[in-house]
Image (tube, helix red, strand yellow):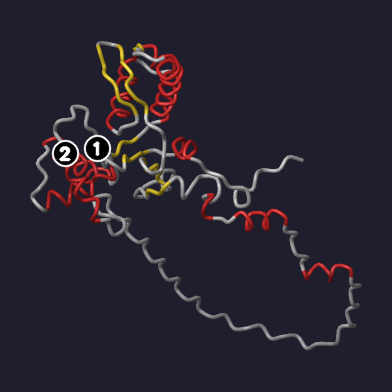
């Protein structure tokens, strides 16, 4: 019989696993955060592999055809080009786009000192605000390696389940039931009026996607402000987790990016009409 691996006993997470599980990544030195699709991550792995084999091993300068890069991960030129721009924005790669080709300069190492890998643990739940967690500390499979001491893991692995104290009664002979005594018939109870069932309390109203789900870290206000008001990035995109910050900066009169203002207005109208984003 094949057993499923017990993730609570056997647990190991490295940066590669965290990168594969994350749906957004933050450069801890620049504060830039971008969302990554599975295709974006495949593209990075392909670029890193080719950079290592050509630039590092052979030396010199090399170019890659963006159409071919896209084809290698199953997407067209536009999607591959947008993926490369995302990887550049967060600092995973650096290089120069020339026409439909890309000249490699450097590919960053995936280290927890430089990057924060996060995933939304509520991603599979409908109408639930996102809750972002560190993929190294909260991996999909079990607990983080550093959170469980090796001796504890070994003890869990070798421990034998304790015997159920109730099992000892299974071997005991059943006692014979005594002969029933003559019992007077119990008078039938008078019918009583059934109480009116109380209405179940209404479910608590879900937290608005325009509000912070928990107290925010004010240390991140500065770089979030610069990121959301940055008009120099032509392909700037906004995510649902940006909405509370957009509302915050709007209330302070500091939201000046026309794209951000239009995005917030569009999301408000959509939420008012449909009740969801």
Mark 2 falls on what kind of element?
helix
Is the residue under label 1 in contact with that under label 2 (CB below 8 Å)?
yes
Mark 2 or 1 closer to N-term?
Answer: 1
Name the spot of residue 190 as percent of width and height, x first.
59, 83
Q: Quadrant of the C terminus?
A: top left
* Above or below for 11 versus 174: above
The residue nearer to you, when weighing 197 against 18, is 18
The residues bearing labels 2 and 1 have C-alpha atoms spaced at a distance of 8 Å
For label 1, the crowd category at 10 Å Cα-Cα, with few meaning under 14, some 14 to 19 and many 20 or more, is: some
Q: In which quarter of the image is residue 229?
A: top left
* Above or below for 176 versus 51: below
Image check: 83 left or right of 111?
A: left
Image check: 147 left or right of 71?
A: right
Q: Quadrant of the N terminus?
A: top right
Image check: 250 left or right of 24?
A: left
Q: Mark 2 points at which residue?
A: 260
- For image coordinates 40% across by 17% down, the residue present is 55
The residue nearer to you, when weighing 257 against 125, is 257
- For image coordinates 46% across by 35% down, the residue present is 20
Name the spot of residue 108 as percent of width and height, x first.
37, 31
The residue nearer to you, when weighing 176 against 112, is 112
- For image coordinates 38% across by 31% down, the residue present is 37
Residue 23's label in the rendered image is none
Name the spot of residue 128 as percent of width and height, x first.
37, 49
Query: How many marks do you count on the picture?
Result: 2
Image check: 112 left or right of 172?
A: left
* Above or below for 252 versus 170: above
Q: Name the residue under label 1.
A: 238
Mark 1 falls on what kind of element?
loop
Name the spot of residue 75 as percent of width and height, x first.
39, 18
């Amino acid at each position: 019989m094949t057993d499923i691996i017990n993730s609570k006993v056997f647990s190991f997470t490295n940066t590669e696993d965290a990168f594969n599980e994350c749906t957004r990544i933050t450069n801890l030195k620049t504060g830039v955060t971008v969302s990554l699709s599975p295709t974006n991550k495949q593209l990075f792995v392909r670029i890193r592999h080719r950079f290592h084999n050509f630039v590092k091993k052979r030396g010199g300068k090399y170019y890659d055809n963006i159409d071919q890069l896209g084809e290698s991960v199953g997407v067209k030129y536009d999607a591959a080009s947008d993926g490369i721009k995302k990887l550049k924005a967060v600092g995973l790669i650096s290089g120069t786009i020339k026409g439909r080709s890309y000249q490699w300069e450097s590919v960053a190492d995936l280290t927890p000192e430089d990057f924060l890998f996060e995933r939304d643990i509520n991603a599979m739940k409908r109408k639930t605000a996102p809750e972002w967690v560190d993929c190294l500390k909260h991996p999909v499979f079990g607990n983080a390696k550093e959170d469980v001491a090796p001796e504890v893991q070994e003890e869990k692995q070798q421990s034998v389940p304790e015997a159920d104290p109730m099992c000892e009664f299974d071997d005991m002979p059943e006692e014979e039931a005594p002969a029933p005594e003559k019992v007077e018939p119990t008078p039938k109870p008078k019918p009583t009026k059934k109480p009116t069932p109380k209405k179940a309390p209404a479910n608590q109203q879900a937290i608005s996607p325009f509000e912070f789900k928990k107290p925010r870290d004010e240390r991140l206000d500065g770089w979030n402000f610069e990121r959301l008001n940055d008009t120099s990035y032509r392909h700037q995109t906004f995510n649902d987790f940006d909405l509370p910050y957009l509302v915050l900066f709007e209330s302070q009169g500091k939201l000046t990016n026309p794209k951000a203002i239009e995005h917030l207005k569009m999301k408000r109208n959509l939420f008012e009409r449909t009740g969801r984003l």
